[in-house]
Amino acid sequence: MTYRKDAIPYLILLPTILYLVAFLGYPLIQTFILAFTSETGAFGNFQRLMDSGDFWKALKNTLLITGIIVPLQLILAIALALFVNMRFKGYSMILYVISIPLALSDVSAALMSYNIFAPTGYLNKILLKLGLLDRPLYFFGYMFQNREFWIIVLTEVWRATPLVFVIILAGLQSINKEYLEAADVFGFSSWQKLTRIILPLLKPSIMSALLIRTLFAFQIFGVVWLLAGRDILILAGEAYYWHNNVNDPHMSSTYAIVIAVVSLIISWFYISILRSRELEGETK
Amino acid sequence: MIKKIFIIFVSILIILWFLTPVFLIVLASLTPSEDYYDQQRILPKRLTFDHLYKLFVVLDGWRATLNSLQVAAMAIGLSFLVGLPAGYVLTRYVFPGKNAIRLSILLTRSFPTLIIAVPLIMIYLRLGIGDTLFSVALAHTSFILPFVVLITTSILSGISVEYEEAGMIFGLSRIGAFMKITLPLALPGLAASAIFAFIMSWNEVFISSVLTFVNRTLPAQILNTAMTSPDYFKFAAGTVMAIPAMVFIFFTRKYLMSMWGISLK
C-alpha cells in the first residue's frame, strides 16, 4: 500500500461521487418533494394513499409475496447448494444450469411462465391430450386472482432462487473442511453436521442472501405486471400505474417513498441482527 | 451405488426444472401459429422463423433491440470510465474517509432504483434530453457504476501491488504500470463484470418504461405491447430477451461466484 497525503485519491473519486449525488441523491430529494406536495398540504398525498383501498391491497400483496417467496427460495437454495457442493462428476454443468435464471429478466421469466400456463399453453395441451381435462384450465384473468397469485409465486421462486443459491454456495465453499473432518472423528451424523456446524457457519451468507432477496422481492414489478396487470395490486405496480396511466407524478412518488421506507426498515432489521450476532461472537 | 443413483436422479430433476421453461419458450417462438392454437398438438409439425422475423422486421423489434444495445454500451462505457479509476484508488491508496466512501457506495446498492425514475423525467426534460437513449443510459449508470466500483475494487485487490511497484522501479509511471501490468492481469475479471453490467442494463424494465415513449428499449417495448399482441409474439420476444443473457452466463460462469457470491459485510 502506498501512503499519500495529497489530493489525488479524492480527485479520482470525485467523478463517481458527483455522479451518484447528481443521478441518485438529487432525484431522491425530488421524489420526496413530489410526494410531499399536494393541493391539500404536505401530507395530502399520504392521506389519499391511506384512504384508498388500493394502497392497502398493494401493501398486503407485496408483503404476502415477499413473505412467501423469500423463505421458499432460501430452503430450496440451501438444498441445491448442499447438493452441488458434493462435488460429484459433472457438478459444474449443474452449476451452470442453475445459474441460467440469474441472467434472465423478470420480463422473460414472466413470458416463460405465461407460455406454460396460458389457455393454449403447454400445461393445458398436455393435460387435455392425456384426457385429464375436457376444457382448458384458466390461470389468468380477474376471475382467477388466486391462481394468478400462485403462478407469480412459482415464477419468482423459479427465477430468483439461483441468486440465493450462488450466495449460499459461496458461503459453503468458504467453510473450513477441518471442522467437518473433526465432526466425522466424533461420529456426527450428516444431519448433525448440517444443523450443528454447516448452518451456524453459513449464517452470514444466509443473512445477506435474505437481505438482498427481501429488498428485491419488495420491488417486484415485471412478473406481476405482465402476468396479472392490475388484477393483483403491488406497490411498484401502483407507482408505475399512477405515473404512466393516471399521469400523477405526486402519487407515483408517494408509492415510491413507501417502497423506499419499507426497504430501509427491512435493511435496518437485517443489519441489526447481523451486528448483534457479530457482537455475540466477539464476547465469546 | 445408491449415492450415485441419487445424484443422477436429483441432477435430472434440476435440469428439467430449470431448463424446461427455457426450452418451451424457444419452441413456442418457432411454432407455426396454427399448430400453437391447435389444442391437440403439443409438438409442432414444422418449425418456422416467421414470428421472430415479424417481431424484428414488421413490428420494429430490431429498433428496440438496437436501442437496448446502445443503452447498455453507453452505460457500461460510462460506468467503467468513471468507476475503474475509483476502484483503483480504493484498492491502492490509503486515505482518510476511504471506508466511509466505500460504505456509502455499497449502501446505494440496497437502494430501490425505481424510486428515482419519476423525478428523472423532469430533470431530463429540463436538460433537453427527455425520451432519449442517452437519458436511459445515464439512469442505468446510476446503479451500474456502484457495482463497477465495488467489483473492480475486489478484482484489483486480488492482484498484488508488487508487480506494479516492480514496474515502477524499472521506470514506468504509475499510470504506465497500471496499463501495462495490472490491467492485462485484471482483464478477464473486468470483462466478466462488463458482461454482468450488460445484463443488468439489458434486463432493466421499470426505469426504461417510465423514461421513454418513442425510443423504447426491448424490455420496455415488450412490457407495453406484449399483452395486446398475439401469444406467439410474446414468446418470440421472450426468446430474444433470454438468449443473449444465457450466452453471456455461459462465458462468465467461472466468475459467477465472485460476482454474486459477495456477501454484504
Image: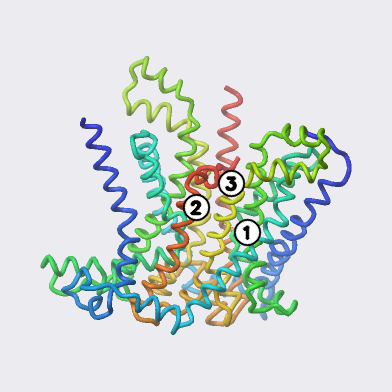
* Amino acid type of the residue that numbered disc 1 sits on in the rendered structure: Phe
Mark 1 lies on a secondary structure that is helix
B20, above or below A276, in the image: below
Question: What residue is shown at x 70% (from left), y 45% (from top)?
Answer: B102
Of mark 3 and mark 1, the one earlier in the sequence is 1
* Amino acid type of the residue that numbered disc 2 sits on in the rendered structure: Thr
The chain containing the residue under callout 3 comes to B
Pick whichever, A104 or B184, lies toward us.
B184
Q: Which mark is residue B143?
A: 1
Q: In this view, does B196 lie to the left or right of B108?
A: left
Closest to the camera, between mark 3 and mark 2, is: 3
Q: Residue furthest right?
A: A6
Question: Picture coordinates of residue A129 (x, y %)?
Answer: 14, 68
Q: In this view, does A248 lie to the left or right of B203?
A: right
Question: Picture coordinates of residue A66 (x, y %)?
Answer: 44, 56
**In the image, are marks 2 and 1 on the same chain?**
no
Question: What residue is shown at x 41% (from left), y 50% (from top)?
Answer: A161
The N terminus of chain B: image quadrant = top left
Neighbor class of circle 2 (other Cα within 10 Å; few <14, some 14-19, many 20+) is many
The chain containing the residue under callout 1 comes to B
Q: Which residue lies furthest to the front in this view?
A: B170
For mark 2, what is the residue? A214
Asked if disc 3 and disc 2 are in contact, CB closer than 8 Å, the reply is: no
**In the image, are marks 3 and 2 on the same chain?**
no
A214, above or below B9, in the image: below
Asked if disc 2 and disc 1 are in contact, CB closer than 8 Å, the reply is: no
The chain containing the residue under callout 2 comes to A
* Amino acid type of the residue that numbered disc 3 sits on in the rendered structure: Pro
Q: How far apart are marks 3 and 1 (CA)?
A: 22 Å
Q: Residue furthest left?
A: A131
Q: How far apart are marks 3 and 2 (CA)?
A: 31 Å
For mark 3, what is the residue? B188
